[in-house]
Image (cartoon, rainbow, N blue to C red):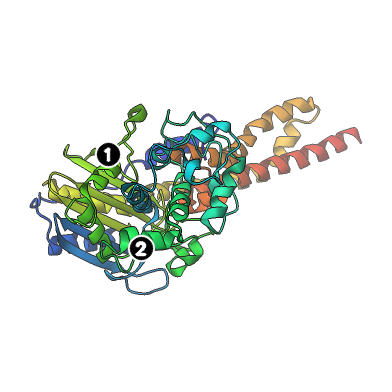
Amino acid sequence: MRMRMARVAGVAGALLALGATTVHAAATPERSGDLTASVLDDYVRDYAERTGLPGAVVAVTKGDRVVHTAGYGRTAGGEAITKTTPISIASLSKSFTAMAVLRLAEERKIDLDAPVRRYLPEFTMADPRAAKITVRQVLQQTSGMSDMTFPELTLPAPDTLKDAVAMLRTAPLATEPGTAMAYHNPNYAVAARLAEVVAGVPFADHMNAAVFRPLGMTSTTTVNTTGALPGRGAGYIRAYGRVIERAHPKWFLNGSFGVVSTADDLARWLIAQNGANPALPANLVKTAQAPSGLGRSTYGMGWYAGKTAGGAPQVQHSGWLLTHNSMQTVLPESRYGIAVVTNTGMISGDDALFITNGLIDIIEGRPDAGAAPFTMSVDLWLAGLSVLNLALGALGVCRARRWARRRQGRAIWRAVVRLLPYTMPFVLFFGLVDLAGFVTHRAATLELITYVWLALYVWAVTGALAAAAVIISRSLHLARTGRRSRA
């Protein structure tokens, strides 16, 4: 989803810029710097009530203790969500995969700076430079692979890690390995397959032995495809101020976003990421969280390094499925860990991000900003614009005969020139794929856009339909007028 047609999608780009703002409620008084179970519960329940959030799991830790774990709302299947409800954590899975590979490096079974092919000969690409890709580069997303050259989400989903790696045989590289960072899910499919081959057991078994079981994460696993997720990945999208239940199309997940966990188990993971669990060596945690620094990249191995709104250091990673989104954050100075997963989809419903930022605001003593997904306000404008599209299209059809009569006897090319501007809505509609790619840095399809931002899709569709109706009706009346004139 990377091709750029910024000029073509100018109107949609302007709407997207408008959508980047958030809804703000009246600010509340500043809160205490400490998160407690009651404060956390009050905040999440208030957020859910204010935004209509269907369901979420939240885990908060501090140092080696659990502050609170809880579930809120219901799944798409109607079941109550609790702290033991299994839920897909999307791309937070990358930090788990990285740790599984680092465990093999700790046991000296692999060298992070050795080529991947030393351990995984089946890893081949349609680019001879792929032979130089190292294990470290795959984990740090600096391998040179990219959605620009391998748009994986637009391709048929494989069923196994072996198949996922085999699909790369026809893919070229976008850049020289080790020269630039590009976030690309297949990097972690390769890492997971490497771990599977070196460990000599299925990847899920290696994850269980190397990561989950040592940390006491007894309710956590990793799966291959969305079909193996709880409820087959069904969740919700946001549109027109409401949440709409949607099934999830088949995606391959393992390695990159295949982990299914619970609030209780995520708390155990956060404690380990704060260096408070001896079962996970501190040097491995440090290696995973440290950014590569390549080209100013802040990405480590399944973690981004950055700062909070208050300027405190943090490491975090977000996760997106079409029907779920997630965020995990570690604050080294205060030693808080926060993990949030919600059953609302990407872009239009980044609830996990807003909840996380709200909890960090509490920790750092800022007032509640009352932020909410931008679609809750922008979609209402798009709804009005969609109705306007249809109204203008109907008006154009009604006036088509009069329009054709005024051009009777004139050169046909003049009428064609007058109709050309009506092709722009078609260009915009089909340019939505490129716009989505520019924004999300992923390869997209029109179907995916119906998940990512349904209201924008409907606005573009109504514009294209209205324009088509006007072009067809004017052309028909023009042809009839011409025949009468010749007769």
Q: Is residue 31 visible?
A: yes
Count of picture labels: 2
Secondary structure under the numbered disc 2 in the rendered image: helix
393 vs 318, left or right, is: right
Snapshot quadrant of residue 333:
top left
Residue visible at 44% across and 65% down in the picture? 229
- What amino acid is at disc 1? Ala
Residue 451 badge: none
Q: CA distance from mark 1 to mark 2?
A: 24 Å
Q: Verify CB contact (< 8 Å) between mark 1 and mark 2.
A: no
- Up-down relation of residue 185 to residue 172 (above or below): below
Residue type indicated by callout 2: Asn
Q: Position of residue 478 (x, y in %)?
A: 78, 37
Residue sitting at the far bottom:
79
Location of residue 138 in the rendering, given as x and y in whole percent from the top left corner: 43, 41
Please tell me which residue is depicted at 81% across the width and 38% down the height of the picture: 479
Residue 190 is situated, as x and y percent measured from the top left of the image, at 48, 47
Q: Which residue is mark 1?
A: 290
Q: Counting residues from the N terminus, which is met first, the one under dot 1 or under dot 2?
A: 2
* Labels 1, 2: front one: 2
Residue on which the image places disc 2: 208
- The residue closer to the viewer here, 283 or 256, is 283
Side of 120 where 415 appears, left or right: right
Residue sitting farthest toward the front:
108
Residue 389 in view, yes or no: no
Q: Nearer the viewer, residue 479 or 375?
A: 375
Dot 1 lies on which element? loop
Local packing at callout 1 (Cα closer than 10 Å; few below 14, some 14-19, many 20+) is some
Image quadrant containing the C terminus: top right
